[in-house]
């Protein structure tokens, strides 16, 4: 017979079960109201599944409830041209959604099953609704909420080495590395992560209707450019420590510790210089127009092996 003292049913355990159930009931009530009013909810993209029929669905979690969004309702718009050949449509969509795992997703509920507590939703509906509110609805002065030069908050939905994909109030846009920072940025994944909220400055908005909107934005003008001031501290023949951020066609891009972008075409060290190596850099010329120091890597202080 098991130890009775370890198997006592207490009053608290019953209360805990009830509390958990009442919490879930409360959330379900909120979900039901959102369904009736077509209110936009936000959850986390947690998975991708393939159904027996071959269709792909994405799984979004909203306060522990599983929300199914068919991939056709994810609004994955793909550019069709020679430079963007991703193969078959569904494979391309799957590839993109895969990079988005962990990001925040807005959705509008399309259907509910109260008995099973299952939810089907659409990201597309939510994005179109947000586009109308933020890009077309105007205030008393005739200005929409999102307009060029305004600083707004954006969601990072995927990150690659040289580009960050962000969602700005229902519109997705790609921000290349050159627009992310005034610093040399070898790998955007070191500074930006899926799920981050970042501040961006709107550079351009092209909006015909909610279905056809494109936005161009950058991050670097929000952060500000200190490169000119830092470059003034840099002296020709000065020797500075720095980190290799990128290497392209034999050109080495170094970020000096004094906050200056530098370029080296020559390395005196017998070892091969690599990304993230710490190096000693001698300045031979200062290019004030491009805000960069030119020079030579005299030695590798520490290799990033």
Image (cartoon, rainbow, N blue to C red):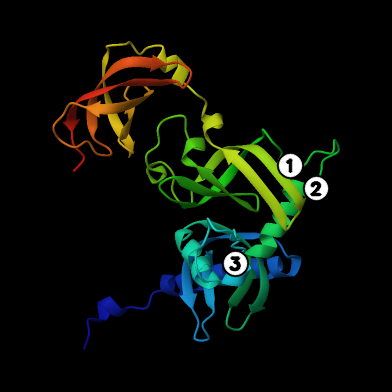
Q: Pointer 2: what residue?
A: 137
Quadrant hosting residue 231: top left
Foreground of the two, 282 or 156: 282
Q: Is residue 245 above or below residue 233?
A: below
240 vs 50: above or below: above
Q: CA distance from mark 2 to mark 1?
A: 8 Å
Query: Which residue occupies 18% across, 30% down?
Result: 300
Q: Which residue is mark 1?
A: 145
User: Where does label 3 land, which residue?
Assistant: 27
| Residue 267 marker | none
Name the spot of residue 148 as percent of width and height, x first. 69, 36
Q: Nearer the viewer, mark 1 or mark 3?
A: 1
Task: Say which residue appears at 67% left-offset and 49% top-offset.
Answer: 214
Tell how many labels. Answer: 3
In this rendering, would 263 be left or right of 194? left
Residue extending farthest bottom: 1
182 over 235 or under it: above or below: below
Label whose residue precedes the other's in the sequence (2 or 1) = 2
Q: Residue furthest left?
A: 270
- Contact, mark 2 vs mark 1 (Cβ under 8 Å): yes
Point out residue 302 in the picture as x, y percentages from the top left corner: 18, 33
């Amino acid at each position: 017979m098991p130890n009775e003292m370890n198997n006592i049913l207490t009053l608290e355990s019953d209360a805990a079960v009830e509390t958990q159930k009442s919490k879930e009931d409360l959330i379900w009530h909120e979900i039901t109201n959102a369904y009736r009013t077509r209110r936009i909810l936000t959850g986390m993209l947690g998975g991708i599944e393939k159904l027996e029929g071959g269709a792909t669905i994405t799984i979004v979690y909203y306060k522990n409830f599983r929300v199914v969004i068919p991939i056709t309702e994810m609004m994955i718009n793909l550019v069709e041209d020679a430079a963007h050949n991703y193969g078959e449509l569904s494979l391309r969509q799957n590839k993109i959604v895969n990079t988005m795992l962990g990001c925040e997703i807005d959705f509008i509920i399309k259907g509910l099953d109260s008995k099973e507590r299952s939810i089907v939703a659409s990201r597309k509906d939510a994005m179109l609704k947000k586009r109308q509110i933020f890009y077309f609805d105007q205030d008393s002065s005739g200005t929409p909420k999102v307009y060029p030069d305004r600083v707004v908050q954006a969601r990072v939905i995927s990150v690659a080495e040289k580009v960050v994909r962000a969602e700005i109030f229902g519109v997705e846009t790609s921000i290349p590395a050159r627009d992310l920072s005034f610093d040399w940025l070898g790998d955007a994944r070191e500074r930006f992560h899926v799920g981050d909220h970042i501040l961006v400055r709107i550079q351009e908005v092209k909006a015909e209707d909610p279905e056809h909107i494109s936005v161009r934005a950058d991050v670097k003008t929000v952060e500000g450019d200190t490169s000119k001031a830092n470059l003034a501290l840099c002296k020709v023949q000065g020797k500075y420590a720095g980190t290799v951020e990128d290497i392209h066609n034999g050109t080495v891009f170094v970020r000096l510790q004094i906050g200056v972008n530098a370029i080296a075409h020559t390395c005196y060290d017998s070892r091969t210089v690599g990304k993230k190596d710490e190096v000693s850099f001698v300045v031979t010329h200062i290019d004030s127009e491009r805000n960069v120091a030119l020079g030579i890597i005299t030695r590798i202080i520490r290799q990033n092996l």
